[in-house]
Image: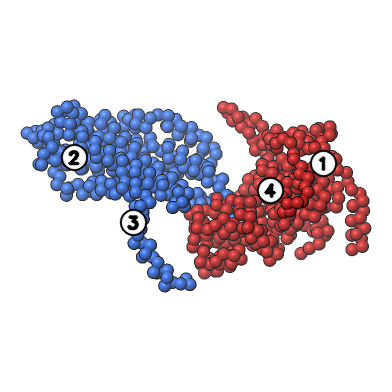
Chain colours: A blue, B red
Amino acid sequence: MATPATEILQVPTIRRGRVRDAFRRHPTAIIGGALLLAMIAMAILAPYLGTIDPQAVSPIRRLRPPSELYLFGTDMLGRDVYSRVVYGARISLIVGLSVAVLSILIGLALGLVTGYVRAVDTVLMRVMDGLMSIPPVLLAIALMALTKASVENVIAAITIAEVPRVTRLVRSVVLSLREQPFVEAAVAAGTGFVRTLVRHILPNTIAPLMVQGTYICASAMITEAILSFIGAGTPPNIPSWGNIMAEGRSVFQVAYHIILFPGIFLSVTVLAVNLLGDGLRDALDPRLARRM
Amino acid sequence: MIHAPSATARTQPLLQVVDLRKYYPVRRGLFSRISGYVYAVDGLTFTINEGETLGLVGESGCGKSTAGKTILKLIEPTAGTIRLRGERIDHLSPREMRPYRRELQVVFQDPYSSLNPRLSAGAIVAEPLINYGIASGRELKDRVTALFAKVGLREDQMARYPHEFSGGQRQRIGIARALALNPRLIVCDEPVSALDVSVQAQVVNLLMNLQREFGLSYLFIAHDIAVVEHICHRIAVMYLGKIVELADRRSLFSSPQHPYTEALLSAVPVPDPKAKRKRIILPGDVPSPINPPPGCRFHTRCPYAEARCRVEEPPLREVRPGHFVACHLRSVDTAAFAAADAGGAVR
């Protein structure tokens, strides 16, 4: 307030070097984020990327190797693998991001309750232990067996499998934050329960949750592909990377490209999300940030 | 407002703690059976008067911080009564406790973990004022600015975040937050032990100036005897959850009565290389508060321990006027009482 002129002058100089600074400090986060953004752009812009109808069957042109006309070749029904892979990105990303968001929201709510209410804690955490003792893929398969194949059900099944991990994380963070002197000081200063939770506990759980979210996103995409690969996931009328690979499996030795390209895309996307997660973990850790 | 310490017996003390206890259950086994207790605080009795600083000293793990937090009702006492201006607060629920929190504030030891890293310094100091609806908008900002000035911080530092401050500055933010509600008593839980010696002096002087200005009372928890000697009017020495000696500063330092206090005082460094010192080295370690020794808790390390000390627990007795000690080996100094009575009559 005393020197408004200098304040105004300082702002743009800080802004200008920001992207370069961010990149220098956290190259993995930037590379991962950029790759992920490219994948999202590809999924959204799928109809404009030289694709044809991914479901269009053309028996005459089946099992063509990659060529100029069919970039990634065709599958055993003569469908264009390139178009299917590009459209398939939609499923992987939708599943990955929805599972990450949903399991974080549910896990956050459950974790806050278990971190604060002792009676709920003992019951709920035993349930969570039970869920965690089953491998997530197996649990998702079992849940899918109970319902019909649809993208929504795949999301729900994987979310249920991932929630216990988030709950554990949030609970442990809440338990350690509760004992922090700044939370005790807030209580001593007359801060009410809800306000303490919202202002002092919640903001300090965001950083670890964002990191956890990226890992969940990556593992959800893999789980979706596994479910689809074994036929327990996305229905066959919707192209997903897992589906495409599952369908190419029987002709793998004559038409390797049907499996290769969705496999590459899946790996790159999962890698991008993991890189982003590692970068975020470093960027959001205040102890590391202080050292910079 | 009464200033003469001799008259305080008749007036109401600001804080009165009687037989305060805090036991933590130790759980073992499959069904978390309670197999014992940690006797963290085991029967504390003391009072703090208006404008007075009571020091609570003792080594790590003797329960002094637990005592502070229990008085603040950040943890529930197991037994005992806490009275603030004569009103019992020990059994109050968090909701009922709220109005009393305005009078009872805290400054913590660690200036790094006692401030929320995601709030600005101004927001941290403003929070208690918002909580009690004392001020808002322009007035809130003015009050926070005034509090910043009181603790020696600049107005333009309000928008900064805790990690941008040094340890001493952070402790000043903590003090400003404690002052915001115009409390009567501030529990200082080792407020300077995490700071550099030069910064310690600044913070201690700030606390003393604030006391003079606002008539504050402090419960000053510390393990640094030199700091305690500087700031405290009366000092309570704790050992394994109990007070072993309680006296005013002068009489504690000139004639410590309890063997533990003697050993503690002999450990204070003297800033004179030629000074002859008889350092009392206590053998052994502090016993576990889960299984405190029977009789006098200090008998396992006491150089003078007798057979009686191993079976019978010494009560805290007034051996000289205003000087309490829990030791079998000290007898009541009747001459001192007589002299005090005579002096009181003359006065």
Q: Which residue is mark 4?
A: B223
Q: Residue at x 22, y 47 (%)?
A: A42
Instruction: Give the number of the disc on residue A235.
Output: none
Q: How would you rate the neighbour count of disc 2 (Cα within 10 Å): few for under 14, some for 14-19, many for 20 or more? A: many
* Between marks 2 and 4 in the image, the one whose residue lies nearer the viewer: 4
Q: How would you rate the neighbour count of disc 3 (Cα within 10 Å): few for under 14, some for 14-19, many for 20 or more? A: few
* Between marks 2 and 3 in the image, the one whose residue lies nearer the viewer: 3
Image coords of residue B101 (percent x, y): 63, 55
Q: Amino acid at mark 4?
A: His
Return the disc, 2 or 3, that comes first in the chain's sequence.
3
Q: Amino acid at mark 2?
A: Arg
Image coords of residue A206 (percent x, y): 43, 48
Callout 4 secondary element: loop
Q: Residue at x 48, y 36 (%)?
A: A124
The total number of labels drawn is 4
* Between marks 3 and 1 in the image, the one whose residue lies nearer the viewer: 3
Regarding residue A206, the answer to whether it shows in the image is: no
Instruction: Give the number of the disc on residue A19.
Output: 3
Marks 3 and 1, how far apart at CA: 69 Å
Marks 1 and 4, how far apart at CA: 21 Å
Task: Please report contact status of discs 3 and 1: CB closer than 8 Å, yes or no.
Answer: no
Q: Amino acid at mark 1?
A: Cys
Q: Which residue is mark 1?
A: B327
The image quadrant where one finds the C terminus of chain B is: bottom right
Q: Which residue is mark 2?
A: A84
Q: Is residue B166 above or below residue B256?
A: below
Give the image quarter of residue B34.
Answer: top right
Q: Could you tell me which chain the residue with mark 2 belongs to?
A: A
Task: Please report contact status of discs 1 and 4: CB closer than 8 Å, yes or no.
Answer: no
Marks 3 and 4, how far apart at CA: 49 Å
